[in-house]
Amino acid sequence: MKKIINDPADVVAESLRGMAAAHPELLRVRSDPAVIVRADAPVPGKVAVVSGGGSGHEPLHGGFVGAGMLSAAVPGAVFTSPTPDAVQAAVDETSGGAGVLLVVKNYTGDVLNFETAAELAGIDGVEVRSVIVDDDVAVKDSTHTAGRRGVGGTVLVEKIVGAAAESGADLDRCEELANRVVSQVRSMGMALTAPTVPHAGQPSFDLAADEMEIGIGIHGEPGRARVPLTSAEDIVRRLLDPIVGDLPFASGDDVLLFTNSMGGTPLLELYLAHGIAERLLAERGIRVQRRLVGPYVTSLEMQGMSLTLLKLDDELTELWDAPVHTAALHW
Amino acid sequence: MKKIINDPADVVAESLRGMAAAHPELLRVRSDPAVIVRADAPVPGKVAVVSGGGSGHEPLHGGFVGAGMLSAAVPGAVFTSPTPDAVQAAVDETSGGAGVLLVVKNYTGDVLNFETAAELAGIDGVEVRSVIVDDDVAVKDSTHTAGRRGVGGTVLVEKIVGAAAESGADLDRCEELANRVVSQVRSMGMALTAPTVPHAGQPSFDLAADEMEIGIGIHGEPGRARVPLTSAEDIVRRLLDPIVGDLPFASGDDVLLFTNSMGGTPLLELYLAHGIAERLLAERGIRVQRRLVGPYVTSLEMQGMSLTLLKLDDELTELWDAPVHTAALHW
Amino acid sequence: MGCTAHDVIVALRAGAASVAEHRDELIQLDREIGDADHGENMDRGFRAVVSKVDTAVPETPSAVLKLTATVLISTVGGASGPLYGTAFLRAAAAVADVDELDGPAVAKALQAGMEGVVARGRAVVGDKTMVDALSPAVEAAKNAADSGEGPAKVLAVAAEAAHRGVQATEPLVARKGRASYLGERSAGHIDPGARSTALLLSAFAEAARSRS
Amino acid sequence: MGCTAHDVIVALRAGAASVAEHRDELIQLDREIGDADHGENMDRGFRAVVSKVDTAVPETPSAVLKLTATVLISTVGGASGPLYGTAFLRAAAAVADVDELDGPAVAKALQAGMEGVVARGRAVVGDKTMVDALSPAVEAAKNAADSGEGPAKVLAVAAEAAHRGVQATEPLVARKGRASYLGERSAGHIDPGARSTALLLSAFAEAARSRS
Ligand SMILES: Nc1ncnc2c1ncn2[C@@H]1O[C@H](COP(=O)(O)OP(=O)(O)O)[C@@H](O)[C@H]1O
Ligand SMILES: Nc1ncnc2c1ncn2[C@@H]1O[C@H](COP(=O)(O)OP(=O)(O)O)[C@@H](O)[C@H]1O
Ligand SMILES: [Mg+2]
Ligand SMILES: [Mg+2]
Ligand SMILES: [Mg+2]
Ligand SMILES: [Mg+2]
């Protein structure tokens, strides 16, 4: 295993120490349990937006803590959802009296742990609501299964609802907006290589030199299908077609296109793929009005990419454009 | 070779197309020869700051084009410096009458091609100056050799001189500032894996599972020494000691610490390393006043990192803090 | 002879040792159809349990189980943390009023534990989860307790049934948890959570046997 | 019999073909002590030269060499682009007034080319660069021309000397170009630019030979 780490057991804690050192003006980090908190939290009278999940997806979620986005992020062990006490600590640190919205990616672990935390916080008298993000069209949705995963769409939910909370929107409104984004966002990802979890010490799956995984998640879990490696043109089509077909997105729609690197894919390739996606969408008459291109929801050093499409309306566009001051998004 | 590309010969051109699509408000891309130009260039009455070099180091340089930083970036083929006609085109597109400053990384190819371009531009009546960045302490400096490479320090030069140009500083002043930064900045890098250049199709060097390269550059050229893979603590020390010893940096110095990912190293590890560097500098009484942490000068998908230290004074700090609006740096 | 609080602690230590010993195997199973952390999660959790019961010294079996639940919930994370946590919490509640666990109490605790897992995770038998190990274990335990067996025997048959349940997960297509994302590709692999359940029950049974 | 503009074009085509054929070898040499692009750079450049001389049809040897220089400068990039470009530019200037190149003219062109490389790159013999191939080639060419040899023979001895120069780069520690970053580790490898120089000279010599 080739990593710049000390003891694998200390990776998350040591990384958080570095993050705290890197961004003193944006955030503070508390430990035991670990929570990344906006520097000026709690902000009185405003809804706090809290998210979290396993570590290894950086900058998700800690890189989105700051004015206009998350009030706190709760980092679990690598690829392991955080525990309820940690989520509860985040609620305690950020609650400003106007309620707390938990943004939860739809994984059994995240849902169960955040659910428990919400119960505990409710007992303490803090009004807590949860929104479940499940944008991954690679997973078949059904009431009998765990349902779709939350992936790239999570960033868009966090940005938009964070902007609303910053502007003073109340908890009902933040919840409604978050659910609106969830209902209008779809994603799909692929991988060329597997990530290596520090405590596991070996790649999460084996992939031949001429193969790729389509419909991959962000936890090193294998994808839906293993297929021969093809061209960027083909890869982008394979991701875009199911996304567009699912909502569905139609000619004349205004959208935000988010081209995401899974970590190990260089920007050179990512922009190349983004250009193809823009062209294919233009051919369908779908109008890309906003874009985000970069490594924002990663799976350690995994090479691969995902595409996320959000149907925009004036309100969502305005909230997307609103100022944001975090380590990873800043405008 | 596992990459999200079409024909290897078209990688740079296709990537630039995607970049243009991604950032219409920041930049435009002209082709034949390829140049990434700030959207509002030329800005009359202001010094234009132009840089460039081989592609594959993204976001360097194109990601730094925009208000407060670069007026244009000239992307060569992957790891190959651009040709003089391309640099000249960048000068033509950005010259606003107050002169043009070329920020050149110290590689024989870059120096020769930019030198020729400066001559050509001079013939056309545009006043052009060059500053050579050579911050890599891994390379022994001598008048009989090619000298030190330009690496991470380049970003700091571009940011600071870009801010000065934006504020209306004249060419003399921009040149003086750029040279001041060069004289006060030092870097060193290491790698865990090799990058694969698309046209080469195989990794630039072979490295065993338990080895790392210390003193690596950003072009897939092997480093100064191949040593057994060690801990993050040891790696950071091996980079920091030569940097601190070279200028030298001393107790009481105010510095900017730039912890850079070579591309494939995840943020989780990078923050961990950054935390160690902050601690080691604090132990020496060197005061970290500003920081930059992320993948800013990369070598495709290479796993590894570099550290860059810049000695700050009030003026440099103010210029670092000045607003910047580019794809990769924005505040 | 019933199980005292001390006996339960000894059993938990044995469970923790078994989890530690099989950590890499559980990681490998989870690597195949999940995210390669189940062994690490369980090991982290049970280490914490062991170090906690060393200092806290709870006085009834129920108190030991409740402490175990709290520690697991706050250290394991992932899906298995809340699920195992709830199982121990419900087991604690089910035996709240006794000082020693006899055969029927052990069977009742197991049953309550499983009901807790189902209440939280909504999995049914055949979904390829720890429920596939728990369900036959609970049934076997109940039968043994009904025939008047003591804790050691009840746990022994439960463990045996659980291991059969583990094997039965192999051909299944997962419908719950992370493995469900794989669809058909999840078939042909054993469920890691079912495996850890069976390992724990075996360790508990062995601890009870050597005590008796 | 001297070399006309047409002959120079034929020689350049042969050079381009040789570079294309050895593209991967040059990449591999550059991979060992550089950045794995020399073969790609040269191939891109000489392809462009060939397609340019097809359309532009320059009328004198000097004009062909000058066009080659401009195309190389604007397509090769890297260190080799300006260096080879300058070499062809200076060679063009050196033979500006003749319609056909005789032996001495070829030797003069080579000499001027090398001086151009040195003027730009400031390398001396032993720095492990293309100068290590050019320098013996220039000397051999001069001697042959002085003894009255024609272009074919002048180029042949130059090529032969260049190949010896290439071999001589192997043990050297690089002091110029990208390989110099490797310090002592650059020893034990052949310099890619020296190799491409020798390949070009061989191809030019072969073209001249088959014509005569
Ligand atoms: N809904 C569920 N009901 C019961 N057990 C489940 C459920 N979801 C997951 N599990 C169990 O949890 C195990 C995985 O645990 P673990 O790897 O620690 O968590 P995660 O899946 O979050 O990485 C699975 O093997 C399965 O036995
Ligand atoms: N200063 C110099 N003088 C002469 N030749 C040089 C010099 N620097 C580099 N070279 C030649 O250029 C070759 C490398 O060319 P190339 O790989 O195309 O460019 P780059 O080094 O920019 O990647 C070297 O093998 C060497 O022969
Ligand atoms: Mg997990
Ligand atoms: Mg090069
Ligand atoms: Mg798991
Ligand atoms: Mg090269």
Image (cartoon, coloured by chain):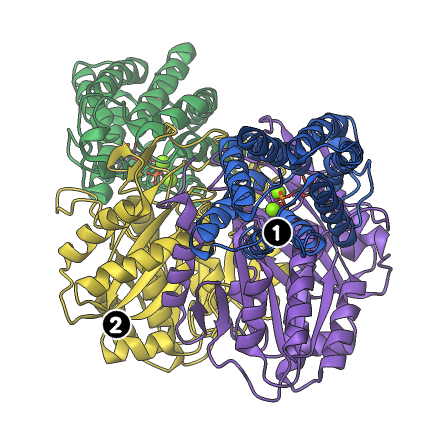
Chain colours: A yellow, B purple, C green, D blue
Can you say whether A306 is above or below B101 in the image?
above
Residue A52, visible in the rendered structure: no
Residue A42 horizontal/vertical position (percent): 48, 73
Tag 2: residue type?
Answer: Leu
Q: Chain of mark 2?
A: A
Residue A8 horizontal/vertical position (percent): 56, 36
* Residue name at image x 54 percent, y 42 percent: D7
Front position in the image: D191 or B168: D191
Can you say whether C116 is above or below B128 in the image?
above
Front position in the image: B18 or D116: D116
Label 2, secondary structure: give it: helix
In-image side of B282 versus B207 (left or right): right
Residue B271 horizontal/vertical position (percent): 59, 52
The 10 Å Cα crowd at callout 1, few under 14, some 14 to 19, many 20 or more, is some
Which residue is the extreme one toward the bottom? Answer: B45
* Distance in Å between CA atoms under marks 1 and 2: 79 Å
Name the quadrant containing residue B212.
Answer: top right
Find residue D99 and name its label.
1
* Residue name at image x 77 percent, y 55 percent: B281
Can you identify the residue that label 2 sits on? A177
Tag 1: residue type?
Answer: Asp
Residue B132 horizontal/vertical position (percent): 73, 62
Q: Chain of mark 1?
A: D
| Quadrant housing the N terminus of chain B | top left
Label 1, secondary structure: give it: loop
Task: Give the image quadrant in which the ligand numbered 1 is located.
Answer: top left
